[in-house]
Amino acid sequence: MRDSNFLLENNARHLWHPMAHPAEMRKNPPRIVAAADGVEIVDVHGQRLLDGVGGLWNVNLGYSCDPVKQAIRDQLEDLPYYSAFRGTTTSPLIELSYELAEWFREDGLVRSFFTSGGSDSVETALRLARQYHKLNGQPERTKFIALKKGYHGTHFGGASVNGNSNFRRAYEPLLPGVLHLPAPFTYRNPFNTADGAEIAQAIARQFEEEIAFQGADTIAALIMEPVLGAGGVIVPHETFMPLMRAICDRHGILLIADEVITAFGRTGAWTGSRLWGVKPDLICTAKAITNGYFPFGAVMIAQKVADVFEGNDSSLGSIGHGYTYSGHPVGAAAALATLKETKRLNVAANAAERGEELLAGLVRLQEKHALVGDARGKGLMCALELVSDRSSKTSASKQVVQKVYDTAYEAGVMVRTSGANIILSPPLVITAEHVNRILSALDAGLSAAAGV
Ligand code: PMP
């Protein structure tokens, strides 16, 4: 590897980072990650860190998952690429669609459409939803409903249903006919209550009003994350998603669950929809489907949707959508090995147990540090929201958040910051000892930041 001076200099000169301001690269250079094993990463200076971020919510099984690495190597040897466009397919892909149908049987999802990542999966689901209604004799159902604070990737469709203005403003105008409901957020919401069940009811009423106003026959789908991730880990009340499902059903609206983060165990259940007892019409997956080792994703499709497509002989029924890497055989082999390991290690159960320990520890940090306005999470997706003043809930400054991050880093734990949130999404194979390491690094970070 080149020396760190060369790397930093050329990073600043030549490389634009996703989700970062190019002008910031010299002032605030990124950490260079050089290696990883187990649940730890090693930076270019040789410092070891427990990865409290799990890559980017995706390395659920850690960095030493040999069966996945071997499956990738073997597939590269046997068949490094072939397409799944009309006319050809590959064995690992067929086997994967079989395994996914098993995996999602309980959710009522019977078909897979493969993609190269989360944004592609969201785009696919939005397009299939519109096409479904056209094939179903309701071509005017084109609008989408989404949640404020929802994150759905960065393609134009995904950015349009995105509920965070900092991912939207620079790219407007976005897709017309997208409407946003409030987030089911107990800490901050327009309803003047912290009661999750009341908030769920209030959003359900707004959803019904919006449907009446727009006309149900103009709405294609509601897209939502079962637990909102990038928007700050917002855990809805248990009644929320079932209420949304019931309203969709009453009005012929499809429900798209964006499970790019929540599928495969992160919330402590195998899918986020299952956590809430809901069967969506489409589920978007990506990230942990290959343990982050290969860019890959899948949209899972319910029988009801499949029937409409498969029962249609017109040219409109052809899926005029797909990527060169829809169903890359190396990604499929990686996914097959990942699913097997994910099941064998029963990571959802560990995510539930370790998640409870982590959240309890975060609540203790909230009691100890005035800086913590809110501590929340489900399974191994958690967040601390930092405030400069608890009663006004004014967000903590950038410097304060950075201090927590830097101190945790020095203490050997990688965390992620998003606005005034500290986000935690460690690999699902962490131990109780790892949880304690995360908590003590954050404790040190919050103590240090109190003086900023
Ligand atoms: N949907 C959700 C819920 C996500 O969290 C993400 C990524 N964080 C995406 C979509 C986009 O996925 P990708 O970055 O793989 O395109």
Image: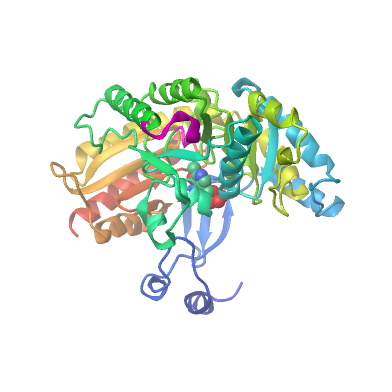
> In the image, is residue 56 part of the stretch drawn in magenta?
no
Asked which quadrant contains residue 452, the reply is: bottom left
Q: Foreground residue, 254 or 315?
A: 315
Compared to residue 111, the image places residue 407 above or below, namely below
Q: Foreground residue, 118 or 444?
A: 118
Asked which quadrant contains residue 114, the reply is: top right
Compared to residue 329, the image places residue 338 above or below, namely above
Q: Position of residue 2 (x, y in %)?
A: 59, 75
Please name the residue shown 55% across and 27% down the image.
Answer: 280
Quarter of the figure with the N terminus = bottom right
> In the image, is residue 218 part of the stretch drawn in magenta?
yes
Please name the residue shown 67% across and 39% down the image.
Answer: 338
Please indicate whether residue 269 sits to the left or right of residue 450 in the image: right
Q: Position of residue 392 (x, y in %)?
A: 14, 44
Please name the residue shown 84% across and 54% down the image.
Answer: 77
Asked which quadrant contains residue 238, the reply is: top left
Tally of numbered tags: 0
Please indicate whether residue 440 sits to the left or right of residue 145 in the image: left
Compared to residue 380, the image places residue 159 above or below, namely below
Residue span colored magenta: 213-226
Is residue 124 something that shows in the picture? yes
